[in-house]
Amino acid sequence: MKSLSEIETTVKRASKAAGYSWGVSEETGKSIRLLELFSLPGIKHLNEYFNEKNKSKFENLNLISENNSSSNNPYCPITLGVSFLDQINVLENLKKIEFKNVAYPIIFISFISRSSEIIGKKIYVKMDEKKILLNLNVNISSNFIEKEFPKLVNTIEVNLLENEDNFTDDEWNNLYKLSEETFVEESDSLKEGAAGAGLTDND
Amino acid sequence: MKVELRDPNKIMKLSRLGSFHQSKLSFLRSFLNEFKEWEYKRDLFNLNENGFGEAVYSFKKNKRVYSLICFANEIKDEERSDRVIATKWDAAFTLHDGVPTKKDIERLKNEVPKQEVGRLSYKELTLSRANKSVRIYNHVVESLSKGKQPDLNLLSKVGYLYRTTAVYGSGKFGLADRFRIKNREEINGPFRLEMMLVYLVRQFTFDQVNHVAYHKNPKTAVKLDDNICKNLGIGNSTGLGMAPFIVNHPTLLNNWILSREKALKKIREIKDVESQDSDLFIDCVKKSLKNITSWNTDSEYQQKKISSLLKDVEKFLNFIDKDFNFKSEYPFNKIYQWLEDNTCEECIEYIVSIMMEPYNDIINPLVKEMSSDEEKYFNIPTYRKVDELRNIIEAKYPNILDINFEEKENNKNFWFISKNKEEPRLADRFEEHGSELEQPLAIARDIKKLYDKLLVSKNSLTIAEFLTSNSELRHVVRRAFIVEKFPYSEIQDNTIGKDLMPIDMLRLKLSFFGALKFDPRSDKWLRICMFQGAPLPNELKSYDEQWVYKTNI
């Protein structure tokens, strides 16, 4: 089995050899390492992408907006990923960002996962009909994780989620009430000795 | 009195870094301190009469066990080479996490001797190989088999029986990734498992000579005297492979140097020094003279450094003896200032290391600050502005900005990875081919390029916007934001100039390992000795902490 350190180093060097700058290659090494850590096919897709890159053209998207569409060639997932990572603090203000025609989207997903950690928000991604939740770079969950990842998607919809509970107030209150059963009612004499007691708070 | 930390623009120059010496902060000393309470055992010693076979040594505490598995092999004299291109070695080793099963040993027997072309698993932590110093090894076996102890004069010329030629860890060749074990308290210090491997290999070398001498002549053979063993270490041949490490791990480098600088600052701030502490300090300086006078090297470069070191240490002792009163206030601050005014860099850093000897209370907490969670500082703060980055570069790289890289001599070399051994190398860009495949290790030149670009960019641009059209400078943008927070993370020198001495970079790292007696064999590789004078495993529970300064051969 290859170690993650070997994966990161080899991906970094291979990315440089494929024409990216050292700095971008370092980012790619980190991202593919992440995919492999989560048992996602990072090496496989990067390998296929680099092979195809020799034969076909891909578009570089450097400045991301709300709607991004490449009508001719598909977007390069590495340049797109690095741009997303770099611009996440601005993109955070948009609720939804759309990308049309993206190659090897799993590579792009790894950069979105890292972006989720930077802004401290979960990110929900729809790739055509497939759904992926990126959870602060701690894990990636999906409804098609067991299936083959596509090499090309028509539409990727990225939704930046607000930090909200994923349970109802009722569910929380019920649980909280139960937790109160571990508390003890305090006597008056104990209350008098508690922190701050006896002082005028307007001192 | 408040003493400032030393200026990174002075300390992070290569000539200063290349003058560093081992200290109490060094990894092999902090390893011994951490593992002194662990149970040491030789679990297996299955060698034939010529000393070939397998052996296992372990350290154990509670449920945690680390086992060194040794494979000693027969090789022909002409196959023995310290160079990284070698494919066979006298012995090969791996440190296994836990107790190895027979199946593990069988698996490793096929892989460990192959080193770089073998495959290890997540159950192995470090990997190494070593060659005999044939002259010394044969002499020791011969002497012991005849019932005599070896000639100490001969031993002192080398200082070890075996020399390692590489020690690998952190995920290389399938070894366990650092993240799998990083939360273990006992290895909360850099290179601790590499140090354990080397330390246990040293014991294997003693057991092997005793074993071979006994089988050579069971009736007359004696064992190598414990005191002689103690004064033998493990050699190491180190080439350029080590140099890029300190460039590629900026926050780690910072934490090593910062710990040293904090230690010096705190010691200089001690107002009244206890007599026992000043006595210990002076005693260590005096006893350390033996380390300098027994420091053998054919390198003219190093001989000059040793000679000025010896002269300056003697001058320093004379000053302490005649002109200095330890009862005055802030004595170590005065000593430091005197050193800066009167001695060479090699001597300043030598004495700085020895100043730490009396102060476990200062040093031990700093040892715990020498690792780094590098991932935390990887992301570039792309929301920041061009003018901020320019200000950082002006403040943190002032001397680098003065270098003119248009001049050939400042841009003479390039670092590359050799195709046949995947090892870093240095070459003249105007004479050798391959500079288009240069590694990103010319930090000074690239920082200067970045600065020039920033000068003609709009102040209000965010770094994200700047990077859209300057991707080739991304690696140095990252570094500049790191050096903003970590002042000692960057070598403040040109790593591609004509005057570069790569062994300065090696020496920096090796001094933190705890190496002694640097012996440059060229400007690109050197030999060193580790653990010479260190306690033997069965002495660890109670040993003299200043053993480094008390070697007898």
Image (spheres, coloured by chain):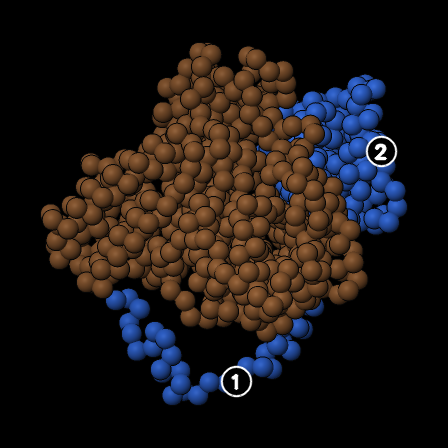
**B420 above or below B111?**
above
Closer to the camera in the image, B247 or B60: B60
Name the residue type under label 2: Lys
| Residue B333 appearing in the image | yes
Q: Which residue is mark 1?
A: A184
| 1 or 2: tag closer to the N-terminus | 2
Q: Chain of mark 1?
A: A
Q: Which image quadrant is residue A201 in? A: bottom left
Which element is circle 1 on? loop
x, y percentage for residue B39?
55, 71
Would residue B304 appear left or right of B111 to someone viewing this image? left
Q: Residue at x 11, y 47 (%)?
A: B323
- In this view, A179 is above or below B201: below
| Chain identifier of the blue chain | A
Tell me where residue A125 sits by quadrant. top right
Q: Secondary structure at mark 2?
A: loop
Q: Which residue, given by chain and number where applicable, does mark 2 sit on?
A: A151
Name the residue rendered at 72%, 24% in the picture. Answer: A18
Residue shown at 65% from the left, 62% from the top: B215
Measured Cα–Cα span from mark 1 to mark 2: 60 Å
Give the x, y percent position of residue B48.
Answer: 71, 60
Total label count?
2
Give the image location of residue B383, x and y in percent: 52, 34
Q: Nearer the viewer, residue B410 or B444?
A: B410
Quadrant of the rendered structure where residue A20 is?
Answer: top right
